[in-house]
Image: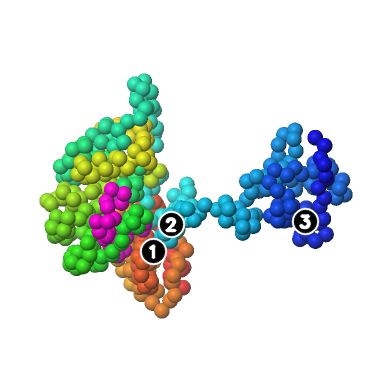
Amino acid sequence: MLRPWQTQFWLVDSTGTTFHTKLINQLIADIKSGRLAGGTMLPGSRALANQLDVNRKTVQQVYEELESQGWLVSKPRRGTFISNMLPEQGLSEENKLLINNAHKTKPPSSLVKNIYQDSFRSGNNISDENDGIPDTRLIPYKILARAYRRACISLSRHSNLGYGDPRGTKVLRDSIQKMLTSDRFMNCSVDQICIVRGSQMGIYLASRVLDSNKGAIVVEEMCYAPAKAAFEANGFKILTCKLDHNGLNVIALEKLLAQHQVAGIYITPHHQYPTTVSLPMDRRLALLKLSKQHQFFIIEDDYDHEFHYEAKPIPPLASLPNSENVVHIGSMSKVFAPGLRLGYLAADKKFIERAAQEIVLIDRQGNTITEHVLADLMESGEVKRHIRKTRKQYQARRNFAANEFSRVFSDNISFNLPTGGMALWVDISKLVEGKEISNLQHKDVNLSTLFCDHSAKPTHIRFGFGALNEQEITQSLQKLSQILLQ
């Protein structure tokens, strides 16, 4: 096609120290100013090289770089054109307003932004985001692989890989119902169980099912930030309740209930997150009585029930009298690994039905294969065997970490040995007295200020020992001592 005019370029005033950068900057400037409109055909690389008296390869490199950035589009046997969909950072303020749809979306809270950014730090390294996570090296991979193979063969033979019950596969709900009945004293039916992609999805579903117009959500003054963010995202006002050495302060909760209308309370009674304290039975019964009296839901996050080391764990809230308003959330992430993404809700049938209605909109079909795999492993006793084995290992790591803390830090720190879980809650107030510590760069440690809103100085750290063997625990604490004892 014969072009009516040859596009000319003037590079004398263009910024850059090399011809390559001068040409790139000039082309971008001409596009941003509107001189080169979307769809405009640029001179061929040979023609432009001749015009500017440079090597053709230089022009080709410029075109390729601008194409990779989204400024240009190469069309085979036709030529190089200005893109009709320009990079947003290259647009004028006027054009940005024309294409920017951000004002049409609901802005995220600062808490959600922080959690989202933190999620990018996670990777395959077992040490990343270590806040009491399990050790993926302990997963029985061979047993898991054989179970996946059996599930794939069985499901394909029986054509059972289509859409199913949004509450989850019946076989897994059956297995979980047996576990909850026999191991956790809970009297629930299969219809009162819903499978979710981990405890966070269960929490989010609870925040969707509950009505923010019916009252606020109460959380412990130090709590699991993603749970709080889920309730905030769904319009709930958040109230914080005081904690003490026994966990949730029920007297403080009564005062909140007298002053505010409350739709629900989110709580981690088994091992309070992050302080690891187990809520005693008298407080559990008092909380349940208040729930029935004031008609609010209790969202019980039982994220690590399997790992209790001292005698038997206290029965969950959902197994006790007056537990009609309890939504019990459990997860298999601590049993195997977070990547397995399987958890469950156990609640009143109507609540489960509402949760399933929400699931239809966001997760019409869960991971059928993985659900069958877990059901297989639960029914064969492999899950129980794995829990029994790893519980001993995690208990040994807890004891070793406690001894190492005492050896490395002596009387400068203090802590109560947790009855379970995969983390220690350590008082470092003596070490930080008179110091300004707002951020602690250590992969296995989080400051207490991370878990609360107020701007008080840090007094404790949460140290995750679960994902570390003894040698790694020693190395981690040696690094921590270099930070805190300097």
Amino acid carrying label 2: it is Pro
Q: Most extreme residue toward the bottom, as rendered?
A: 434
Q: Categorize mark 3 by other alpha carbons within 10 Å: few (<14), some (14-19), many (20+).
A: some
Q: Crowdedness of circle 1 by 10 Å Cα count: few (<14), some, many (20+)?
A: some
Q: Position of residue 114 (x, y in %)?
A: 44, 59
Which segment did they paint magenta? 207-229
Q: Decide: is 352 above or below 245.
A: above
| Residue extending furthest toward the top | 157
**Residue at image coords 43%, 76%:** 435
For image coordinates 70% across by 43% down, the residue present is: 39
In the rendering, which numbered label is found on residue 22? 3
User: CA–CA distance between discs 2 and 3?
Assistant: 40 Å
Q: How many marks?
A: 3
Report the side of 256 relative to 146 (left or right): left
Tell me if I can see residue 129 in this picture: yes
* Badge 3 amino acid: Lys
Q: Which residue is mark 2?
A: 108
Q: Give the secondary structure at mark 2.
A: loop
Q: Is residue 221 magenta?
A: yes
Rendered residue at 59%/55% (across/down): 96
Q: Secondary structure at mark 3?
A: helix
Instruction: Give the CA separation, mark 2 to mark 1.
Output: 19 Å
Of the image marks 1 and 3, the number of the one nearer the N terminus: 3
What label sits on residue 165 in the rendered view? none
Amino acid type of disc 1? Answer: Leu
Q: Which residue is mark 1?
A: 450
Question: Residue at the location (85% across, 50% down)?
Answer: 52
Q: CA distance from mark 1 to mark 3?
A: 47 Å
Question: Is residue 24 in sight in this rendering?
Answer: no
Q: As rendered, which of 8 and 159 lies closer to the eye?
A: 8
